[in-house]
Image: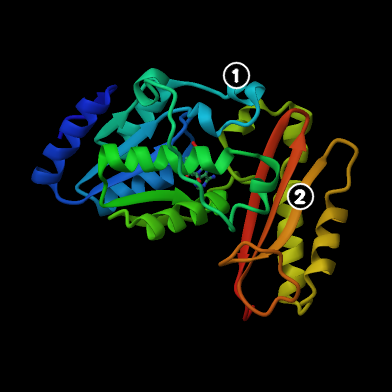
Amino acid sequence: MKFQVVETVQAMRDAARQCRINAGPLGLVPTMGALHEGHGALVRQSAGECGTTVVSVFVNPTQFNDPEDLRLYPRNLESDLELCERWGADIVFVPSVEEMYPDEPLTGVEVRGITEHLCGAFRPGHFRGVATVVAKLFNIVQPDRAYFGQKDAQQLAVIRQMVRDLNFPVEVRSVPTVREADGLAMSSRNSRLSPQHRSLAPRLFQALRAVADLAAAGERDAAQLRQRGIALLDHENIKVEYFEVVHADTLQPAGRLDRDVLIAAAIWLGGVRLIDNILLSGSS
Ligand code: AMP
């Protein structure tokens, strides 16, 4: 199939309908563009498993709680299209804001509980924006499978919950975090780091790893692990927004590590916010 770029909801619906008839299962990879190898892993997995792969590139304004973050969010459509084609995508859906939100929407998808902690506690409205735009994309593209990165573990949990609660006929697939050689999780926002902040950025994953190692060595007290993580990130140029140990299923704070937990953190380096996490099985 010839690589296509589609800009309107109607053209996307028409193209997806044709592909579902002609090419079997359809995979969707929702993104905000400024694509990197992390996105590449999602697209390649979809291309390997589905007859058609659709990548959406849409910087969704409703999930930004900070207008400055929206304004500065990196955009690079030309390179995004080249990468999508190289990774094996068939269709790139690039709607404008007006196309996605022609009128002020009065409807939204709110996922409670799992959004109370971690990023949800610091980014009011963020996950409502995410869940709502993903629900719209699911209705427009009607994919059989949708691919999300483990890097955004809370987002993945929100989408899984929404799919269960609202009976979306979509299989949600998660893809492990792709990292730079020094461990930093790839992120579109990394390009905004100053050289000095870039050199500090790997400390986030190092701290998560050190805490995961402590847990693997037998430390079962989440408060101890949390304290250790915060101490490891103590630096005049790093602001820790949160460092939490939560149950992997509910994303509620853990007391003791008696089942699977997610160790997750968010830090600020200058004006750039970075997140990362490690999933730990209860038996490790
Ligand atoms: P974004 O464009 O940042 O909204 O991300 C789009 C999708 O790519 C989300 O499902 C992310 O979790 C996923 N993603 C972003 N960075 C990475 C990474 N380093 N490794 C794996 N998946 C990622």
Residue occupying image coordinates x 44% and y 57%? 160
Q: Tell me if mark 2 has few (under 14), some (14-19) or many (20+) residues whose alpha carbon lies within 10 angstroms of its own.
A: many
Which disc is residue 71 wearing? Answer: 1
> Mark 2 or 1 closer to N-term?
1
Residue 112, quarter of picture: bottom right
Residue 119 x %, y %? 65, 46
Mark 1: secondary structure:
helix
Residue occupying image coordinates x 76% and y 80%? 218
Residue 196 x %, y %? 79, 30
Residue occupying image coordinates x 63% and y 33%? 190
Residue 67 x %, y %? 63, 22
Q: Nearer the viewer, residue 15 or 41?
A: 15
Residue 155 appears in the rendering:
yes
Disc 2 designates what residue?
242
Q: Nearer the viewer, residue 242 or 106?
A: 106
Q: Tell me if mark 1 has few (under 14), some (14-19) or many (20+) residues whose alpha carbon lies within 10 angstroms of its own.
A: few
Residue 272, quarter of picture: top right
Outermost front residue = 106
Residue 183 appears in the rendering:
no
